[in-house]
Image (cartoon, helix red, strand yellow):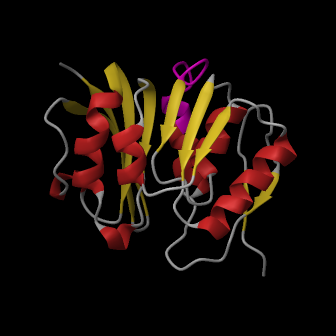
Amino acid sequence: MKNQLRIIGGEWKRRVLPFASIEGLRPTPDRVRETLFNWLMWDIQNAQVLDLCSGSGALGFEALSRGAAQVVMIEPNTTQARYLKDNLQLLKAQNCRLIISTAQQALNKLTEQFDVVFLDPPYSLDLWQELSTLADRLIKDNAYIYVEADRELSQIQLPASWQKIKETKAGQVRAALYQKKI
Protein backbone atom coordinates (compact mmCIF):
# COMPACT_ATOMS: atom_id res chain seq x y z
CA MET A 1 0.00 0.00 0.00
CA LYS A 2 1.20 3.45 -0.91
CA ASN A 3 1.41 6.07 1.86
CA GLN A 4 -0.87 9.00 1.13
CA LEU A 5 -2.31 12.02 2.87
CA ARG A 6 -5.36 14.01 1.91
CA ILE A 7 -5.50 17.80 2.07
CA ILE A 8 -8.60 18.72 4.04
CA GLY A 9 -9.40 22.30 3.04
CA GLY A 10 -8.57 25.31 0.93
CA GLU A 11 -7.38 25.54 -2.68
CA TRP A 12 -6.18 21.92 -2.84
CA LYS A 13 -9.01 20.37 -0.83
CA ARG A 14 -9.30 16.59 -1.40
CA ARG A 15 -5.94 16.39 -3.22
CA VAL A 16 -4.07 13.22 -2.32
CA LEU A 17 -0.29 13.36 -1.96
CA PRO A 18 2.15 10.45 -1.58
CA PHE A 19 4.89 10.27 1.05
CA ALA A 20 7.74 7.87 1.78
CA SER A 21 7.41 4.75 3.89
CA ILE A 22 9.79 5.61 6.73
CA GLU A 23 9.63 4.26 10.27
CA GLY A 24 8.14 6.86 12.62
CA LEU A 25 6.77 9.02 9.79
CA ARG A 26 3.10 9.65 10.50
CA PRO A 27 0.99 12.51 9.20
CA THR A 28 -1.05 14.46 11.73
CA PRO A 29 -4.44 12.66 11.80
CA ASP A 30 -7.17 14.28 9.67
CA ARG A 31 -9.36 14.99 12.70
CA VAL A 32 -6.53 16.76 14.53
CA ARG A 33 -5.53 18.69 11.39
CA GLU A 34 -9.10 19.82 10.88
CA THR A 35 -9.28 21.03 14.48
CA LEU A 36 -5.94 22.84 14.18
CA PHE A 37 -6.90 24.67 11.01
CA ASN A 38 -10.30 25.60 12.47
CA TRP A 39 -8.37 27.20 15.34
CA LEU A 40 -6.08 29.02 12.87
CA MET A 41 -8.84 29.86 10.39
CA TRP A 42 -8.40 33.65 10.64
CA ASP A 43 -4.65 33.59 11.23
CA ILE A 44 -3.27 31.29 8.51
CA GLN A 45 -4.13 33.67 5.65
CA ASN A 46 -0.96 35.52 4.57
CA ALA A 47 1.00 34.03 7.47
CA GLN A 48 4.72 33.25 7.48
CA VAL A 49 4.75 29.57 8.52
CA LEU A 50 7.57 27.36 9.78
CA ASP A 51 7.04 23.59 9.59
CA LEU A 52 9.91 22.39 11.80
CA CYS A 53 9.69 18.64 11.20
CA SER A 54 7.78 18.40 7.91
CA GLY A 55 7.71 14.64 7.49
CA SER A 56 4.79 13.90 5.16
CA GLY A 57 4.22 17.64 4.73
CA ALA A 58 0.60 17.36 5.93
CA LEU A 59 0.70 20.57 8.02
CA GLY A 60 2.74 22.62 5.56
CA PHE A 61 0.64 21.64 2.54
CA GLU A 62 -2.56 22.33 4.49
CA ALA A 63 -1.24 25.80 5.43
CA LEU A 64 -0.35 26.55 1.80
CA SER A 65 -3.74 25.30 0.62
CA ARG A 66 -5.44 27.66 3.08
CA GLY A 67 -3.58 30.79 2.01
CA ALA A 68 -0.32 31.02 3.95
CA ALA A 69 1.97 33.62 2.34
CA GLN A 70 5.11 31.53 2.77
CA VAL A 71 5.92 28.14 4.28
CA VAL A 72 9.40 26.95 5.23
CA MET A 73 9.51 23.14 5.45
CA ILE A 74 12.40 21.36 7.15
CA GLU A 75 13.03 17.67 6.46
CA PRO A 76 16.32 15.80 7.06
CA ASN A 77 15.41 12.55 5.28
CA THR A 78 16.48 12.88 1.62
CA THR A 79 13.99 10.24 0.43
CA GLN A 80 11.05 12.05 2.02
CA ALA A 81 12.44 15.44 0.93
CA ARG A 82 12.20 14.20 -2.68
CA TYR A 83 8.50 13.43 -2.11
CA LEU A 84 7.99 16.92 -0.65
CA LYS A 85 9.77 18.51 -3.63
CA ASP A 86 7.71 16.45 -6.11
CA ASN A 87 4.45 17.34 -4.30
CA LEU A 88 5.35 21.04 -4.32
CA GLN A 89 5.94 20.82 -8.09
CA LEU A 90 2.70 18.87 -8.59
CA LEU A 91 0.77 21.59 -6.72
CA LYS A 92 2.77 24.37 -8.44
CA ALA A 93 3.46 25.85 -4.99
CA GLN A 94 5.83 28.79 -5.46
CA ASN A 95 5.63 30.10 -1.92
CA CYS A 96 7.35 27.23 -0.13
CA ARG A 97 11.02 26.75 0.70
CA LEU A 98 12.24 23.24 1.49
CA ILE A 99 15.35 22.94 3.66
CA ILE A 100 16.93 19.49 3.64
CA SER A 101 18.64 19.34 7.01
CA THR A 102 17.92 18.61 10.64
CA ALA A 103 15.64 21.09 12.36
CA GLN A 104 18.50 21.99 14.72
CA GLN A 105 20.86 22.89 11.84
CA ALA A 106 18.16 24.84 10.00
CA LEU A 107 17.08 26.77 13.11
CA ASN A 108 20.64 27.93 13.71
CA LYS A 109 20.73 29.45 10.18
CA LEU A 110 17.21 30.87 9.78
CA THR A 111 16.75 34.59 10.44
CA GLU A 112 13.18 35.38 9.37
CA GLN A 113 10.30 35.74 11.81
CA PHE A 114 7.22 33.53 11.76
CA ASP A 115 3.51 33.98 12.54
CA VAL A 116 2.73 30.25 12.84
CA VAL A 117 5.08 27.40 13.80
CA PHE A 118 4.36 23.67 13.66
CA LEU A 119 6.36 21.65 16.22
CA ASP A 120 5.59 17.99 15.55
CA PRO A 121 8.89 16.08 15.75
CA PRO A 122 9.23 12.28 15.50
CA TYR A 123 7.95 11.19 18.90
CA SER A 124 10.81 8.79 19.59
CA LEU A 125 13.45 11.54 19.29
CA ASP A 126 12.02 13.63 22.16
CA LEU A 127 13.02 16.95 20.54
CA TRP A 128 10.26 19.25 21.82
CA GLN A 129 12.32 21.11 24.43
CA GLU A 130 15.44 21.50 22.25
CA LEU A 131 13.54 22.64 19.15
CA SER A 132 11.21 24.98 21.05
CA THR A 133 14.21 26.69 22.67
CA LEU A 134 16.03 27.06 19.31
CA ALA A 135 12.89 28.24 17.47
CA ASP A 136 11.75 30.75 20.07
CA ARG A 137 13.88 33.64 18.69
CA LEU A 138 12.24 33.22 15.25
CA ILE A 139 8.67 33.43 16.57
CA LYS A 140 6.92 36.81 16.48
CA ASP A 141 5.13 38.15 19.55
CA ASN A 142 1.53 36.88 19.58
CA ALA A 143 2.39 34.21 16.99
CA TYR A 144 0.86 30.75 17.23
CA ILE A 145 2.76 27.54 17.89
CA TYR A 146 1.16 24.15 17.31
CA VAL A 147 2.67 21.33 19.39
CA GLU A 148 1.87 17.66 18.81
CA ALA A 149 3.08 14.79 20.98
CA ASP A 150 2.37 11.24 22.12
CA ARG A 151 2.30 12.25 25.79
CA GLU A 152 0.68 14.76 28.09
CA LEU A 153 1.85 18.19 26.98
CA SER A 154 2.43 19.20 30.61
CA GLN A 155 5.37 16.75 30.56
CA ILE A 156 7.10 18.76 27.85
CA GLN A 157 9.30 21.70 28.80
CA LEU A 158 8.38 24.62 26.51
CA PRO A 159 9.41 28.29 26.71
CA ALA A 160 7.63 30.16 29.50
CA SER A 161 6.38 32.78 27.01
CA TRP A 162 4.29 30.14 25.19
CA GLN A 163 0.79 30.17 26.65
CA LYS A 164 -1.55 27.29 25.86
CA ILE A 165 -4.82 28.54 24.41
CA LYS A 166 -6.44 25.40 22.92
CA GLU A 167 -5.95 21.67 23.33
CA THR A 168 -7.26 18.48 21.71
CA LYS A 169 -6.70 14.74 21.88
CA ALA A 170 -7.24 11.95 19.37
CA GLY A 171 -6.17 8.45 20.37
CA GLN A 172 -2.49 8.65 21.37
CA VAL A 173 -2.09 12.12 19.86
CA ARG A 174 -2.04 15.13 22.18
CA ALA A 175 -2.04 18.52 20.49
CA ALA A 176 -2.26 22.12 21.57
CA LEU A 177 -2.09 25.62 20.19
CA TYR A 178 0.12 28.03 22.08
CA GLN A 179 0.53 31.77 21.68
CA LYS A 180 3.77 33.59 22.35
CA LYS A 181 3.22 36.30 24.95
CA ILE A 182 6.08 38.47 26.15
The residue shown at (65%, 41%) is 62
Does the magenta-highlighted stretch encompass residue 43?
Answer: yes
Q: Quadrant of residue 125?
A: bottom left
Q: Is residue 168 visible?
A: no
Q: Residue 121, how many percent across, how many down?
A: 40, 59
Residue positioned 61% across, 54% down in the render: 30
Most frequent secondary structure within the magenta stretch = loop
Residue 101 makes an appearance in the image: yes
Q: Quadrant of residue 149?
A: bottom left
Residue 91 point in image, percent of width and height: 83, 42
Q: Position of residue 170 (x, y in %)?
A: 45, 59
Q: Is residue 151 left or right of residue 53?
A: left
Quadrant location of the C terminus?
top left
Magenta stretch: includes residue 20: no
Magenta stretch in the rendered image: 37-47
Query: Which of the two residues, 47 or 170, is positioned nearer the viewer here?
Result: 47
Front residue of this view, candidates 84 and 17: 84
Q: Where does the N terminus fall, quadrant-wise?
A: bottom right
**Numbered circles on residues, count:** 0
Residue 29 position in % (x across, y down): 56, 58
Work out whether 43 lies above or below 2. above
- Is residue 133 depicted above or below 66 in this figure? below
At 83% from the left edge and 45% from the top edge, which residue is drawn? 89
Residue 173 as seen in the image, left or right of residue 32: left
